[in-house]
Amino acid sequence: MSAARLIRIAGALAEATPLPDAALYELARVGRRGLLGEVIRVAGSTATLQVYEETTGLECGEPVEPTGSALTVELGPGLLGAVLDGVGRPLGRLAELSGDFIQPGAALPTLDPDARWAFEPRRRAGDTVAGGDVLGVVAERPGFEHRILVPPGLSGALTEIKAGQFTVGEPIARLADGTPLRLSHAWPVRRPRPSGARLPDDRPLVTGQRVLDFLFPAAEGGSVAVPGGFGTGKTVIEQSLAKYADADIVVYVGCGERGNEMAELLHEFPRLVDERTGRSVMDRTVMVVNTSNMPVAAREASVYLGVTIAEYFRDMGYRVALLADSLSRWAEALREISARLAEMPGEEGYPTYLATRLGQFFERAGRVQALGGPEREGSLTVVAAVSPPGGDLSEPVTQATLKVAGTLWALDPALAQQRQFPAVDWATSYSLHAERLTAWFAGQTGADWPELRRVALELLQRGRELRDIAGLVGLEALQDADRLVLESARLVQELVLGQSAFDPNDARSSAAKTYRLAGQLVAFHRAAARAIAAGARFEQLDLGSARRAIAAVRAAGPAELDAAMAAAERAVAAIGGAP
């Protein structure tokens, strides 16, 4: 049979024939330069491929060579701290070979084949192992134990297992049937990794951001949508989550973002210090970078690459946070590829299977019992930013995301312009897990956590209504009780929900500090309400001292928190003594 040749090229799509045995999602080398492509449609002996690299200069008649495998990623030691492109090539080593721009057809393994790692076995020859079992550990980073797993689908008795220094490609053990086991193994990025039993989503991902933990908590192993227009702080929130969220591993996927923004992110992330270890956040981070000027097909693949890496660390028993920024750019890649395939368009030109693809992606989140280790529990929490045009949350990508996400953190441009951080709109945001998770917070802090949350939400809602009324009739026309609600709502917004990323005592707020701060604000409101009900005028209340005392609680560090709380309690109690 003659070799396959290109017969049609349209941007990132190409058609080749004859390829009668081509499989869907099989990789191929396209053209004389060996560009990486993937089969996405088969019609008889003609295959349609999406090319992951720039196709400029590609000509009809050039050869196409199928590889016989799907798009896979190497999983093993060396991932932490790595910066990969959308198909898993390390950008640092690519730059050493190609300079400032990636050369077409460049092929590099995800993991450094020459690096040697000290392997310490946890199994012995004669042991029977199965997929997901831990063979041993590698100290990849200081304080981090990289567990070497038996690849899913393999099982048998170990005839040998060795300790020592190995590269990722050298055998460290061997099964009775002769199958070698290595420090790394490959996994197709579009196939979810298997796990044991699914566990209930009754634990929160503690973010350290009060507005999120207090009002709209995200479940550990859950899925979160973060829609917001330009300048609302999506990237800053994800940086804060990477630094302060209660996650062992962070996988950041920059999907179709601006090149200068990603360059700034690559500059800032190594400088972020993990307060738990005192080392760089990059020590526990994997970055997948596909900027807006990179090929659109690789943008579509980058999300699957990131979630596969996240599942790998989840299977070791770690808590993983996958931060995807943004799904709108990923959906635009689907739309562009779908249009070139001449598929039936859905709403606003997006493919009709957009919601299905989003559902398949979010379904890979979860808290699970690790395969092969009932004592190991891991979780994968997906936090996905969405960039709706003009901040319109009714557009198709946002709506499709909300159908499958359990939590919504909607960002409000008006709050961002008021320098409120995080600029989360409490009137639009929600958490479907709030009831179960507030019970967890109550067990960790105080039984009245749900009541404090209810009162805070009521104050915020009533305060918004009263601001609209005051805008019509004037503040002086409001009754004293309503003026107090306005003041209390403002303080909840500023002192409880707002945080300063530049204040080391306020950039991250523990659940205990959030509870105590919210308790003081609710006590402030109730004490003032009792004084007004007893006949005091709003102007007569000494609210200024209480405001300053509660603000001091927000700014207090761990060592000063108890003293600041005592001062705030005295100031709040003094409100009730007003005439």
Image (cartoon, rainbow, N blue to C red):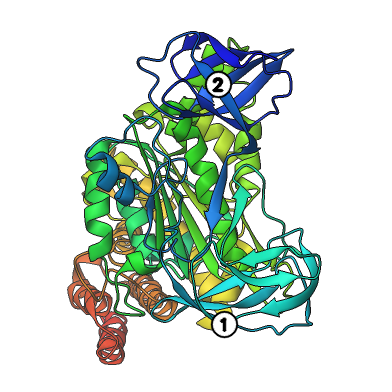
- Quarter containing the N terminus: top right
Task: Indicate whether 34 appears above or below 85.
Answer: above
Task: Indicate whether 359 appears above or below 66.
Answer: below
- Quarter containing the C terminus: bottom left
Circle number at residue 284: none
The alpha-carbon separation of the residues under discs 1 and 2 comes to: 43 Å
Amino acid marked by disc 2: Val
Q: Quadrant of residue 529?
A: bottom left
Q: Quadrant of residue 229?
A: top left
Provide residue 568's location: percent of width, then percent of height: 27, 84
Return the residue at label 1: 163
- Foreground pick, 270 / 520: 270
Among numbered discs 1 and 2, the one appearing first in the sequence: 2
Which secondary structure, mark 2? strand
Provide residue 355's location: percent of width, then percent of height: 62, 31
Circle number at residue 64: 2
Task: Indicate whether 370 appears above or below 52.
Answer: below
> In the rendered image, is residue 447 in sight?
no
At 69% across and 25% down in the image, what residue appears? 22
- Foreground pick, 535 / 468: 468
Provide residue 365's location: percent of width, then percent of height: 61, 54
- Foreground pick, 267 / 486: 267
Which secondary structure, mark 1? loop
* Residue found at the far front of this picture: 1
Amino acid marked by disc 1: Ala
Crowd band around label 2 with a 10 angstrom C-alpha radius: few (<14), some (14–19), many (20+) = many
